[in-house]
Amino acid sequence: MQERYLRGIAGSFILVTAILGYFVNPAWLFFTVFVGLNLLQSAFTNWCPMMWILRKLGVK
């Protein structure tokens, strides 16, 4: 269940910051890059800060 939440949160962050980067300020794209890099590093290390947060919130 945590992975489902993680995908939803990451997808939402990427979508929202891409829209903000296009319509508001291109600097928002740095947050999009941060989320993408975090997903990439979690693929190699099997550790993701958002998973830690979801566990602390009690998501099973």
Image (cartoon, rainbow, N blue to C red):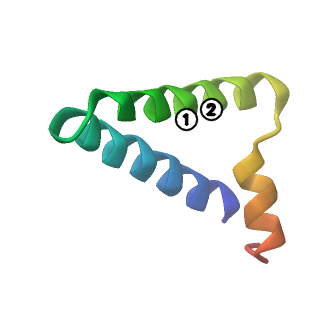
Please state, as top left, top right, bottom left or bottom right, where the N terminus lies in the image.
bottom right
State the residue at coordinates (35%, 42%).
Answer: 17
Single out the residue that lies furthest toward the left: 23
Q: Nearer the viewer, mark 1 or mark 2?
A: 1
The relative height of residue 25 versus residue 2 in the rendered view (above or below) is above
Category of crowding for the residue at label 2, using alpha-carbon neighbours closer than 10 angstroms: few (below 14), some (14–19), many (at least 20): some
State the residue at coordinates (16%, 40%).
Answer: 23
Q: Determine the image quadrant of residue 38.
A: top right
Q: Which mark is residue 5?
A: none
Dot 2 falls on a residue whose secondary structure is helix
Question: Is there a contact, CB below 8 Å, between mark 1 and mark 2?
Answer: yes
Residue 6 horizontal side relative to residue 58, left or right: left
- Identify residue type, mark 1: Val
State the residue at coordinates (37%, 35%).
Answer: 28
Quick one: 3 or 26, which is closer to the camera?
A: 26
Q: Which mark is residue 35?
A: 1
State the residue at coordinates (82%, 38%).
Answer: 47
Dot 1 falls on a residue whose secondary structure is helix
- Identify residue type, mark 2: Leu
Q: Determine the image quadrant of residue 51.
A: bottom right
Q: Give x and y (percent) for residue 20.
A: 27, 43
| Residue assigned mark 2 | 39
Residue 31 horizontal side relative to residue 25, left or right: right
Please state, as top left, top right, bottom left or bottom right, where the C terminus lies in the image.
bottom right
Q: Give x and y (percent) for residue 25.
A: 26, 34
Query: Marks 1 and 2, Cα distance to the nearest angstrom?
Result: 6 Å
